[in-house]
Image (cartoon, rainbow, N blue to C red):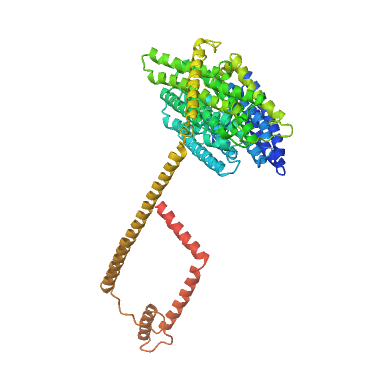
Amino acid sequence: MNGNWLLPLAALLPMALAPAVWALGRRKDQRSLPAMALGCGLEAVLVLIVALQAFGGSAVSFELPGFCGQGLRMQADGFRSLYALVACVMWLCSGIFSRDYLAHEHAAARYCFFTLVTLGAVVGMFFSDSLFSIFIFFEIMSLASYPWVAHEEDPAAMRAGETYLYIAVIGGLTMLMGIFLLPAGVAAASLAALPELCAGQSLWLPAILMLVGFGAKAGAFPLHIWLPKAHPVAPAPASALLSGLLTKAGVFGILILSTLVMRQVSGFGDLIFRLGVVTMLLGAVLAIFSLNLKRTLACSSLSQIGFIMIGAGLCNLLGEENGLALYGTVEHMVNHSLFKLVLFLCAGVVAMNTHRLDLKDVQGYGRNKPFLHLCFLLGAAGIAGFPGLSGFASKSLLHEGIVELIAHLEGHGHAAGIYRLSEWLFLIAGGMTLCYMLKLYLCLFWMKNDTYQPQYDEKGSYLSLPARIALGAAALLVPVFGLLPGETMSRFGEVSRSFMQGAAPHHLPIHYFSGENLKGAAISIGIGAALFGLLLLARKLGLRKKLTLHFDLEDMVYRPLMGALIAVGGAFAACCDRLMDWLTAFLKGTGGAAAAAMDGAVDSAAALVGRTALKPVHEAETVPVGNRLTYTLGRWLDGASKVLHGGKEPKSSFVTSLAALWEEWTADWRQLARSVSYGLVLFCLGLLCTLMYLLW
């Protein structure tokens, strides 16, 4: 273990606090909520210390060799410190707001436990410095965040949690397969060394597999299906984190693939770019036709992830001229995290006071609530890209990146038609963003509705002071970043450039409020106003319900496809099983017949040999004393003795004597054979024979 111990401590501190916070709330869940907020505050201080060291130019790294066979590597540079700090700020604001939102909810202690564990995993992942280390924290994050989705434990929450878990597990296993297919040493190498290690190698297969894993977490098409289902059922503070931060964990991995692993492969950057365009448009269309407050914001997240993926693709396609695209990508990542923190907390205010999310039920709730009105307006206008707010700055740079790519391709004699189309789709998607955010804004704060009875306390307050501070501080950053983009947002891009080994913009400082950028924003705003006018017309004509989209990719494609695969696989397995049964029966029948035939043949051969070559001899006659040898030899010696004595019978018979001698010698031999001495004698004889053979 060597390096700065603050890095592993930043990942382990929230995880270590989680059991204590859970134990504190065992008897009364609400006790765990302020403890969780305090834990998030301590983590924010620790990460701020690390970030200040990294922003100051100090090398902040940590390595644990041999961990899980690959080693654990961590490093804090500008980009990773920035996003670890963004994560802590979001967790702190969400934790403070949770005291209001979960005050009367069940299982608050469980929620706090997994919130802290997820925080530690997210910080650990952003500080990771190898693909293997990223995978470890990525999987902890995915599994620990599941209880957020299933928190309510009703059928809708359990179904959404099931989808979330399926996508997380499939994505994680696919990513791990891609890591295994990388060349030796790449998975455990430092991220800064990846361009050199991967240069000149064909890594399309592992890169695609890892893209599936990271894209599933980011919510990119076609693995976005968990996102519109998870947010409506999860608690609003958790939805803010799911949308604003956990999707960025997937984007973090996509940026590594685009700018480091596949740095010199423009085809891979083009793939990410095209997936980004599809994701951007799909999310915007779904958000326009959604009639649920949190689901609209979830589909909006899907669309904004598409904007960020376009930037990630541009960082690869533009090569050494990717400065503006890189800045725009990082800035929009931070902006989207900020927007979704503000908007989902505002949605949480609506949900916890009305206990409804359908737009027709919550319309008019924000009337006469200036604080909530201002916060939501800043978030909605910011994400729509109005000049003077932070979303305008990041989207303008992404648009400039597309224009630069078109100019670069045409300058080298290449066709750029698909990218010209993508530029217009980018502007149209920006207008669609304004359309659905304007729909939510007017519904909540201008329309009238007398069908609900909001639950106020005795003073009529719908939000506590700490929650107001958390929400107001987050909303205030939107105009601060938007009015001072050169002093704030450009700094985000500058500290992130070294991580992605990107180029600096050609012109610094960046002219955010140039005529071209204002023109692009005006086009998007005009498109959005026109689309919203069409929506109003459709509503006036009574076409609102008819225009509602009920297309569900999971129910209409993925689940039937999985059912078909299971059916086909089951049928194939049944056929294989039946085939093996037939083969076994066939082999058993033919083998049994062959064995019977062979057995009969052997018996016949044995009988034939027994009747011919091994014909049994007549049984020898027995002798009265001893065996035939002693008896025959004794009879011969008795006869010789009788001849020598002149025909007289000898006094003792040799037959009896030799029989007794044979019996005694046989007994002694048996006793010797059973003794150890006999074995030693044989060993010595064998050794003697061996020596004689060698000497010979």
Which of 582/566 is in front?
566
In this rendering, position of residue 598 left or right of residue 655: left
Viewer-side residue, 342 vs 598: 342
Between residue 491 and residue 199, name the one nearer to us. 491
Residue drawn where x is 68% and y is 27% of the image: 468
Relative image position of residue 294 (x, y in whole percent): 57, 33
Vertical placement of 237 versus 560: above or below?
Answer: above
Q: Tell me which corner region of the image, top left, top right, bottom left or bottom right, holds residue 8.
A: top right
Quarter of image, res 469 = top right
Q: Is residue 199 left or right of residue 138?
A: left
Q: Is residue 534 above or below residue 487?
A: below
Residue name at image x 50 percent, y 21 percent: 529
Query: How many numbered marks appear?
Result: 0
Indicate left or right for 254 with 120 as reference.
left
Rendered location of residue 28, percent (x, y): 72, 42
Residue 280 location (% of width, % of height): 48, 26
Image position, residue 7 (x, y; %) = 63, 29
> Does residue 509 appear anywhere in the picture?
yes
Q: Quadrant of the N terminus?
A: top right
Report which quarter residue 460 is drawn in: top right
| Vertical side of 27 occupied by 41: above or below | above
Tell me if I can see residue 261 in this picture. Answer: no
User: 632 or 244, which lies in front?
Assistant: 244
Q: Answer left or right for 8 relative to 70.
A: right
The answer to whether 176 is drawn above or below residue 320 in the figure is below
Looking at the image, which residue sits at the far front? 541
